Amino acid sequence: MRGLKLKPKNETVSQPWRSLPESKKSLDYLTSYKPRKTEAKHLRILLHGPVGAGKSSFINSVDSVFQGRVTGRALADATSGKSFTKKYKTYKIQNDSGSCYSFIFNDIMGFEETTNNGVHVDDVKLALTGHVKEGYEFDSKKLLKEEDEGYNSHCQPVIWEFLNWLFSPKLMKPVPKAKENTENVYVSDYLKETVEKFSMLLGIPVNCIFLVKNYSSEVEIDDGINNLILCALRQIVAFGEDYLNNLSKKSLDFVKSYKPKNKEIKHLRILLHGPVGAGKSSFINSVESVLQGRVTGRALTDAASGKSFTKKYKTYEIQNDPGSFYSFIFNDTMGFDETPNNGVHVDDVKLALTGHVKEGYEFDPKKPLKEEDEGYNSCPTLDDKVHVLVSVLPASLVSSLSDGAVKKMRDVRLLASKMGIPQLAVLTKVEKFSMLLGIPVNCIFLVKNYSSEVQIDDGINNLILCALRQIVAFGEDYLNNL
């Protein structure tokens, strides 16, 4: 590597400059690892580097550690000087039960110095963002474009996991003592200097660079090699898990610190609507549960009656510190019903959008709110009006939702569109629902409401926070556009 020119040394320092954890601890951590972020089935690890660096060999070496024998699934070539990896490929490591561990590797073509050779850097960037399809064949002369078959246009970067990592699997080769005994790698002053130089070249912190020896000439498993590989892999997975958890932390930080920039607005008002039993009130309780750190149930619900349990137009503020509240509020409505004279009247929901429904107004399915009624707000302020419309629907109703309910929800959405109010949706499966109401797929969010749980769950929290962050962000965009 250019700029990394050091003379091999046989000498060693008196004390190890890095200690290795017990291999059993690393192995236990990796075999039991599951991403806490429930949207992520696997932690995805992308390997990149120059041709011949040992990316495919590292995958084989990891596989060898877990299989207890030397394997060679990721094909490698040590003689050609050209990248042997031509396609974007995912490798899963199988466990004893026949399933796979919760981390996966993506192998790519290597970088080359010469023009029109090796992987294009933009293709690696697209891989990081999830836009490269499995099996895409790299073309050194032509980078991947949106219109190409290998381009994944439906990825969701919030749900996928990416980790950009670099290894130095061949650094110990010039050091005889390290070759003889892998335990010496973190005693060698030559290797220490090499790691420091490598850190300066690419800007990767020293504690994020690991010395590993890939299985190459060996035909039997070696404990010392295993320990180096496990040490590196444990940190890769741990850092990746931190990244996944930080996604929800960013959402939580955004939601907690949010204040409308529009000074006329005290609160961002979020209106929930949808069919009876959709989970509107439960979603409000679930959001409050996340922010309070305990399961709450202020918005009363009924899972058994089949009728709307919400009878009045009610505003829910969520307490922050004692005496203060978060800068977004929810309005709950009676649910839509297919049968005549049942459920909320669509005109009442439209009036709520425009701020004409007073707090505490009792919905009457047989009679929509009129100007002369006591529950009519004749002079709504900007603060009274709705700033985000959220449709709520469970997956079980997507395929069976009646034409009447769809029409009502679309009517409300059309008015919101005319008013410039952003619309999002909260449910468990998105494809059919998007086609029903016309809400873009990237504006529909997967959530699980707290229902039978009595304790807070990080996975449920992450889903709720992901949805809430976008709801608040879209509402803020609307306020700023007024």
Image (spheres, rainbow, N blue to C red):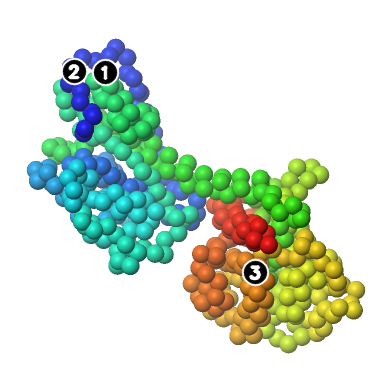
The span from disc 3 to disc 2 (Cα, nearest Å) is 69 Å
**Mark 1 is on which residue type?**
Asp
Task: Give above or below for 62 relative to 428.
Answer: above
What kind of residue is marked 3? Gly
Mark 3 nearby-residue class (10 Å; few <14, some 14–19, many ≥20): some
Q: Residue furthest front?
A: 482
User: Mark 1 vs mark 3: which is more N-terminal?
Assistant: 1
Residue at 55 percent across and 48 percent down: it is: 248
Report the side of 218 relative to 208 (left or right): left
Mark 2, residue position:
9
Residue 228 showing in the rendered view: yes
Residue underneath mark 1: 189
Q: Position of residue 69 (x, y in %)?
A: 21, 43
Lower position in the chain sequence, tag 1 or tag 2: 2
Residue type of the residue flagged with mark 2: Lys
Q: Position of residue 236 (x, y in %)?
A: 37, 39
Relative placement, left or right, of 248 versus 276 is left
Contact? badges 1 and 2 (CB < 8 Å)? yes
Alpha carbon separation for disc pair 1 and 3: 65 Å
Side (left or right) of 40 relative to 304:
left
**Label 1, residues with CA under 10 Å away: few <14, some 14-19, many ≥20:** many
Q: Nearer the viewer, mark 3 or mark 2?
A: 3
Q: Quadrant location of residue 323?
A: top right
Q: Residue at x 29, y 26 (%)?
A: 197
Q: CA distance from mark 1 to mark 2?
A: 8 Å
Residue 452 visible, this angle: no
